[in-house]
Structures are given as structure tokens and as C-alpha cells.
Amino acid sequence: MGLRSAPIFSDGFVLLGELGGVFSALNPQTGERVWGGGAGGPINTPATHDGYVFFSSWDGSVNSVRINGVIPQWNTNVGTPISTAPFVYGDRVFVGTVTGGVIALSRTTGDVLWRFETSEGSVIGAPLAAGGLVFVGGGIGTLFALDAVSGDLRFTFDTGGAINGSPAFSGGLLFLGSNDSNIYAIR
């Protein structure tokens, strides 16, 4: 079992994605696989929200499974490899793609609601949503702030290097690391 990304703990399970395209829910005491599923490519770090787990894969798929009862809810293929963990915000799930896109899906149906292309290479860090905006870093150093509902561009912020990590938000400030060796705090 080669891991693609970090495991998480939620709803009594260790949840993780493997390089071989297998998603697993493990018993935290024994390490035994309790349930899981698959995709056609490496699976990114999952996200959970309100009793559901969301996982994305480099094969372009995003999946939602109700944890209690292990009931698949939806599987959507967005047509391009997904390079980030999903981020759940309100009624939406956001993912970043290898081709530099950000995609918003309906949390309940998996329908694609909008797409935005950064034109900056792969999105490496997971999108972050806060205050009605979605923040995502680009490969050549631009932070994009998008309207969470419409996907419209609200503003950009340029750094001196690639943004390869996820931003963080606390106390009305967005924190952002860049390959230019700086950490930015944006109000």
C-alpha cells in the first residue's frame, strides 16, 4: 500500500487514499481495512463533512460516500486529473486540477457547478474557502480569489514564487506561503 497523501481521522475511522487507486477506511486500533472503494488513479487526501467522506483521484473522479452504512452518494468525473484534496464549504466541494483549474461541485449531487482556469500550471495546494470566497494558488505565484457561488474572479495577489501549499484562514486573515521564501498575511 503506497500512500498518495496524508490520512485523516474522522467518524471513528482512519481514512486514506493509495497510489494504486484504492480508498480505505481503517480501524484505528487494529489497522484493519473495514471498507473502501476504488478509482482509476492515485487518490488524494480525503475530506469529511457532516457524516460524508469525499475523495478525489488523479483519474479525474470525485466521490461522495455516506460513512454510516457505507452508502455511495455520487461519483463525478471532471475530465481532467485532480491534484488536490477536496475542500468542502457549505453546499459545495472544491478541487484543483493538474491543468491549473479549480472546479466546484454540488456537495449533494456531484454536479459540476463551475470551472475556473488559472493558466498557471498545476494547482498543488487544496483550495480553501472562507467568507464567500475560494482561494487557490497558482504554479507561477498568483493567488486567485474566486466567488464561491459563481466562480467569478474577485481579485489576484502576486508573490515572487510558486504557491505549492494550501492557504490558511483565521481571524479575518488569509495566510499564504510562496516559493519566494515569504509567508503573506492578506486581509
Image (cartoon, helix red, strand yellow):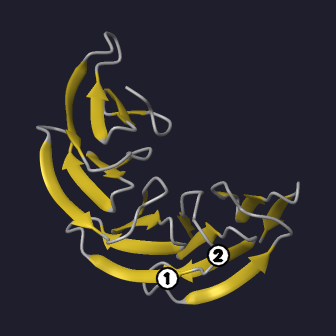
Q: Is residue 24 above or below residue 177?
A: above
Residue 171 locus on image (x, y percent):
70, 59
Label 2 neighbour load within 10 Å: few <14, some 14-19, many 20+: some
- Residue in view at x 14 percent, y 50 percent: 72
> What quarter of the picture does the N terminus occupy?
top left
Residue 156 locus on image (x, y percent):
71, 82
Q: Is residue 1 above or below residue 166?
A: above
Select label 2 or label 1 by which is in front.
2
Q: Quadrant of residue 139?
A: bottom right
Residue 50 locus on image (x, y percent):
30, 49
- Residue in view at x 32 percent, y 71 percent: 78
Label 1 neighbour load within 10 Å: few <14, some 14-19, many 20+: some
* Residue 11 visible somewhere in the drawing: yes
Instruction: Label 1, secondary structure: give it.
Output: strand
Total tally of numbered discs in the picture: 2
Q: What residue is pinned by disc 2?
A: 120
Q: Is residue 180 above or below residue 157?
A: above
- What number is the disc on residue 59? none
> What quarter of the picture does the C terminus occupy?
bottom right
* Residue 50 visible somewhere in the drawing: no
The reply, left or right, for residue 110 in relation to residue 59 is left
Instruction: Label 2, secondary structure: give it.
Output: loop
- Residue in view at x 15 percent, y 56 percent: 73
Residue at the top extreme?
A: 30
Q: What residue is pinned by disc 1?
A: 116
Amino acid type, callout 1 = Phe
Asked if disc 2 and disc 1 are in contact, CB closer than 8 Å, the reply is no
The reply, left or right, for residue 73 in relation to residue 77 is left
Residue 172 locus on image (x, y percent):
70, 65
What separation in Å lies between label 2 and label 1 (alpha carbons)? 12 Å
- Residue in view at x 28 percent, y 38 percent: 22
Amino acid type, callout 2 = Glu
